Image (spheres, grey):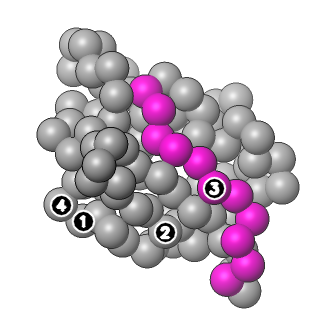
């Protein structure tokens, strides 16, 4: 059985500001929810609180694809590893069917 590493985050926790460790580095993540569109965004700041990257959580998309400034080698990809049927990261599936997986680039 394959073991996957993921960043623990559930819809019930959002909005939340936290500092997950990825590739031995910590950044400040500010996760927000847009109720009108049922979508999530993440603002990533450096240790001093300077905003360095903003992204939207998209199924199958590396949320750090343009985040070279973060100097991370891993990808963080929202995935539905239950059966792959989720098309979007929503308040119904985040933390349940959909998790933020840390994957080798």
Between tags 3 and 1, which lies in front?
A: 3
| Alpha carbons under labels 1 and 2: distance apart | 11 Å
Disc 4 designates what residue?
12
Q: What residue is disc 3 on?
A: 54
Q: Is residue 17 above or below residue 99?
A: below
Q: Assign a secondary structure to mark 4.
A: helix
Q: CA distance from mark 1 to mark 4?
A: 4 Å
Which image quadrant: the N terminus? top left
Element under disc 3: strand
Q: How far is the residue under mark 2 from the one under mark 3?
A: 9 Å
> Considering only order in the chain, which callout, 4 or 2, is on the residue closer to the N terminus?
4
Q: In which quarter of the view is residue 53 placed?
A: bottom right
* Residue 81 visible somewhere in the drawing: no
Label 3 crowd (10 A; few <14 / some 14-19 / many >=20): some
The residue indicated by pointer 1 is 13
Residue 38, image x and y in percent? 28, 43
Tag 1 secondary structure: helix
Against 8, residue 85 (above or below) is above
Task: Estimate the spatial distance between the alpha carbons at disc 2 and disc 4, rounded to whole Å.
Answer: 14 Å
Q: How far apart, in angstroms, are the residues tagged by discs 3 and 4?
A: 21 Å
Residue segment shown in magenta: 49-59
Residue 91 coordinates in the image, percent (x, y): 21, 45
Sequence order check, earlier mark of 1 and 2: 1
Quadrant position of residue 27 = bottom right
Whether residues under marks 1 and 4 lie with C-beta atoms below 8 angstroms apart, the answer is: yes
Tag 2, which secondary structure? strand
Residue where numbered disc 2 is placed = 30
Q: Is residue 53 magenta?
A: yes
């Amino acid at each position: 059985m394959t073991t996957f590493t993921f960043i623990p985050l559930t819809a019930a926790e959002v909005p939340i500001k936290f500092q997950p460790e990825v590739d031995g580095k910590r950044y400040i993540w500010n996760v927000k929810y847009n109720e009108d569109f049922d979508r999530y965004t993440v603002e990533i700041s450096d240790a001093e609180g300077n905003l360095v990257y903003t992204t939207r959580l998209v199924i199958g998309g590396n949320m750090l694809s343009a985040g070279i400034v973060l100097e991370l080698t891993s990808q963080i990809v929202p995935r539905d590893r239950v059966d792959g049927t989720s098309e979007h990261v929503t308040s119904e599936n985040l933390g349940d069917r959909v998790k933020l997986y840390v994957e080798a680039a």
